[in-house]
């Protein structure tokens, strides 16, 4: 259902690192990051407070490095550093458009960004700054999906918006099955029981157990994030 006023006052957007690559094989596509920044600004201009959690898969992925023989903890810390690089790139894109943004990291890198402190993050949001939360939870073995759920709960976000490369949650992979069914609404328990590849199980359980709404939408379609702010039919809504 579409409304004239925003559906939310405070949101957390989960972006994958891979989404920043565009058509590249590695790294950050400047065109893509500028488009994402513009959409975040459009959402901000609706009067919505925005936090962002970013992954690092376009640079390093800890689990992938571990699979290639690297120590898992070392790989995960490298992945955390990759998320900081992506967060700084988003901050730069936003600030080039005269929008205040703050990067807050779960690991201490004082020379380039602030430490993540929940109350300080909330204060930045109240001052209408976009807050970009980097380095996951600061702990190895936890994905940035889990970090997104955790941070959304901590800052009191009304919804976690999971940006993907498909239109929402399907009953099977739409890239491999052209008859895959798109759900407009699905429960957390069904995602878990059917082992649907939406977010990792820890993230899903955290959302479910803390009554945090989840929306899954297609980042590749321009203005979908903006549309989701006033139209409840965009993407897939996940709840109890």
Image (cartoon, rainbow, N blue to C red):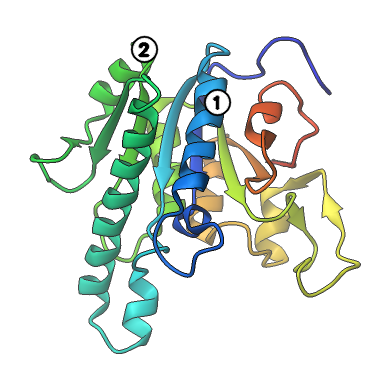
Asked if residue 137 shows in the view, the reply is no
Image position of 234 with respect to 86: above or below? above
Question: 196 or 231: nearer the eye?
Answer: 231
Picture coordinates of residue 196 (x, y %)?
68, 64
Q: Is residue 12 left or right of residue 1?
A: left
Per the image, the residue denoted by label 2 is 126
Picture coordinates of residue 210 (x, y %)?
51, 37
Cα–Cα gap, marks 1 and 2:
15 Å
> Residue at left 68%, top 44%?
217
The residue at the far right in this view is 179
Quarter of the image where one finds residue 52: top left
Q: Earlier in the sequence, mark 1 or mark 2?
A: 2
Q: Is residue 120 left or right of residue 177?
A: left
Quarter of the image where one finds residue 195: bottom right
Q: Are marks 1 and 2 in contact (CB under 8 Å)?
A: no
Q: Is residue 44 left or right of residue 85?
A: right
Q: Callout 2: helix, strand or loop?
A: helix
> Residue at left 54%, top 38%?
35
Position of the C terminus, as image quadrant, is: top right
Picture coordinates of residue 130 (x, y %)?
38, 25
Question: 153 or 25: nearer the eye?
Answer: 25
Q: Residues within 10 Å of mark 2 (few under 14, many from 20)?
A: some
Picture coordinates of residue 174 (x, y %)?
79, 66
Position of the N terminus, as image quadrant, is: top right
Image position of 229 with respect to 204: above or below? above
């Amino acid at each position: 259902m579409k409304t004239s006023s925003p559906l939310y006052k405070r949101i957390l957007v989960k972006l994958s690192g891979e989404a920043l690559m565009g058509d590249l094989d590695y790294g950050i596509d400047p065109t893509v990051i500028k488009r994402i920044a513009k959409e975040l600004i459009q959402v901000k201009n609706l009067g919505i407070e925005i936090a962002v959690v970013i992954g690092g898969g376009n640079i390093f992925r800890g689990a992938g490095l571990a699979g290639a023989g690297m120590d898992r903890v070392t790989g995960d810390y490298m992945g955390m550093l990759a998320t900081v690089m992506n967060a700084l790139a988003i901050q730069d894109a936003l600030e080039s458009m005269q929008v205040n943004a703050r990067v807050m990291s779960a690991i201490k890198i004082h020379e380039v960004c602030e430490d993540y402190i929940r109350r300080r993050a909330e204060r930045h949001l109240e001052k209408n700054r976009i807050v970009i939360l980097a380095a996951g939870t600061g702990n190895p073995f936890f994905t940035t999906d889990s970090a997104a759920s955790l941070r959304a709960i901590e800052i009191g976000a009304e919804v976690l918006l999971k940006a993907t490369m498909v239109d929402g949650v399907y009953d099977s992979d739409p890239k491999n099955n052209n008859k895959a069914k798109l759900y407009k609404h699905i429960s957390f328990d069904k995602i878990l029981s059917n082992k649907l590849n939406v977010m990792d199980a820890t993230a899903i359980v955290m959302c479910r157990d803390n009554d945090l709404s989840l929306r899954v939408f297609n980042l590749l379609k321009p203005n979908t994030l903006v549309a989701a702010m006033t139209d409840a039919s965009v993407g897939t809504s996940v709840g109890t």
